[in-house]
Amino acid sequence: MGEKDLSALKESAVSASVHWAKSGFGWFTMRDRVNDYIEALGVNTAIDDDQEAILHGRRAAALAINISAIHALTKQEELKLNEALIGIAQQIPRTQHRGFHR
């Protein structure tokens, strides 16, 4: 994925996050756009499926969205958004394991 595509996904996630923080509407849209951005960054995978590394990468991506949205929010809205983004980041998607299953 190119730099333009990543930038577009991040802007989409930021705008959805600002809209949710200001109005309280659009939670699922925000969650989906944040997850799409995180997935595009590739932080949902780690060597040996290290869950801690995945979690740290997801938190860093969520904080990048939060930092980009700060200018448009009040202190209370920013705190609300920060808590929501960290909650989204902690929801690590299940991955399918390759290989034989018994």
Image (cartoon, rainbow, N blue to C red):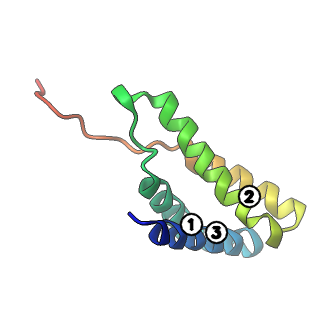
What's the CA distance linking mark 1 and mark 3? 6 Å
Residue tagged 3:
14
Instruction: Pick the quarter of the image with the C terminus.
Output: top left
In this view, 63 is above or below 3: above
User: What amino acid is at disc 3?
Assistant: Val
Q: Name the residue carrying label 1.
A: 10
Which residue is depicted at the point 42% across and 49% down?
42
Q: Residue at x 71, y 64 (%)?
A: 68
Q: For mark 2, does the 10 Å Cα neighbourhood hold few (<14), some (14 to 19), or many (20 or more) residues?
A: few
| Real-space CA distance between mark 1 and mark 2, rounded to the nearest whole angstrom | 11 Å
Residue 56 appears at what percent x and percent y?
A: 57, 36
Instruction: Characterize the local packing of mark 1: few (<14), some (14-19) or many (20 or more) Cα atoms within 10 angstroms.
Output: many
Residue 34: horizontal and vertical position, in percent?
54, 61
Residues at discs 3 and 2 in contact (Cβ within 8 Å): no
Q: Could you tell me which residue is drawn at 61 percent across and 44 percent down?
A: 59
- Give the SS element for disc 3: helix
Q: Residues within 10 Å of mark 3 (few under 14, many from 20)?
A: many
- Name which of mark 3 and mark 2 comes first in the sequence: 3
Residue bearing the label numbered 2 = 67
- Pick the front one: 76 or 44: 44
